Image (tube, rainbow, N blue to C red):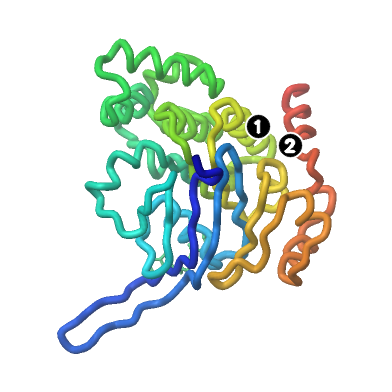
Amino acid sequence: MAADLIVATGVEVVYGARRGLFGDRPGTRVLHGVDVRVGRGETVGIVGESGSGKTTLGRALIRLVEPSAGRVVFDGTDVTHMGEDALRPLRRRMQMIFQDPMACLNPRHTIRRILEGPLRLHGLATDAISAGRRVAAMLDKVGLPQAVLERHPHELSGGQRQRVGIARAAVLEPDFVLADEIVSGLDVSTQAQVLRLLKDLSADMGLSMAFISHDLSVVRAVCDRVYVMRHGVIVEEGRCEELFAAPKAPYTRALIDAVPLPEIDPGWLDRRTDFEDAA
Ligand SMILES: Nc1ncnc2c1ncn2[C@@H]1O[C@H](COP(=O)(O)OP(=O)(O)OP(=O)(O)O)[C@@H](O)[C@H]1O
């Protein structure tokens, strides 16, 4: 069994290219030959300024975007140009948590339907009783009371909604989760609680994750390894503690220097959650 769950090599993504009767439109290349790997059980961070291509890269890793060049291999299978039908059996195994849960949780559905629906769709539960049992266990894991099952997304707080987003991904028992700016809309203590939950859950389930964030303190708190992106290329890659202690690329140095030092200390998450527990 290969050590890495995802191996992406030389990935390029072009938006807006079109073949036309009167000539081809070349489109805009936003990733320029990117190499990324995600080990089993590993959490990698993807950081960089706005527009550097973080979301595009994350989406290419789970084939929501098709690369125009390069290769993406998921658990030994080349998925680079797979069609939707061929990808379907792999979809359950690659989940995504979004920045704004309100935008992806159907406002007309109860939390029960939001969580049980995908289980039935992917064949993990064949009847209401087994779906209900799995969902109830997952709610406990993400620290939500069973009473939220009958509520709608707008009746929950931002932190609770993000827990539902995490539960919806985790209940499918994926191998890989793409978390794209998932705490940027939350206040700092709720951020810490959600990150702590995600960290515990990924350790518990042996999840591999790619964690996209513009916030270095958040990345340092949850990631094993980091990729630093700029203008569609990786400018630096390294283990979290090494990269933050001794960045090699001037751009990484500038990113780190732009954040107040105490904020990027690795104990940030523990201090924040201790604070929350005491409150
Ligand atoms: N669907 C699309 N069609 C055309 N261009 C796009 C599309 N999605 C993103 N882009 C462009 O691709 C570039 C990279 O965008 P991307 O969202 O991947 O960057 P990012 O680092 O995640 O940015 P942010 O932190 O602001 O979300 C940007 O210039 C963006 O405008």
Whether label 2 lies within 8 Å of ligand 1 gets the answer: no
Q: Nearer the viewer, residue 277 or 75?
A: 75
Q: Pick the residue in front: 236 or 106.
A: 236
Q: Is residue 35 above or below residue 208?
A: below
- Three-letter code, disc 1: Arg
Q: Residues under labels 2 and 1: Cα distance?
A: 7 Å
Label 1 neighbour load within 10 Å: few <14, some 14-19, many 20+: some
Q: Mark 2 touching mark 1, by CB under 8 A?
A: yes
Give SS at disc 2: helix
Q: Residues within 10 Å of mark 2 (few under 14, many from 20)?
A: many
Where residue 216 appears, as percent x and y from the top left, is 70, 53
Q: Closest to the observer: 84 or 145?
A: 84
Q: Amino acid at mark 2?
A: Leu
Q: Is residue 185 visible?
A: no
Q: Residue furthest left?
A: 21
Q: Residue at x 67, y 64 (%)?
A: 236
Reading the image, the residue beneath label 2 is 269
Judge whether residue 186 can be spotted in this image.
Answer: yes
Position of 239 compared to 84: left or right? right
- Residue position for label 1: 196
Residue 167 in the image: x percent, y percent? 46, 28
Q: Residue furthest front?
A: 1
The x, y position of residue 264, in whole percent, is 78, 49
- Residue at 29% in and 82% down: 25
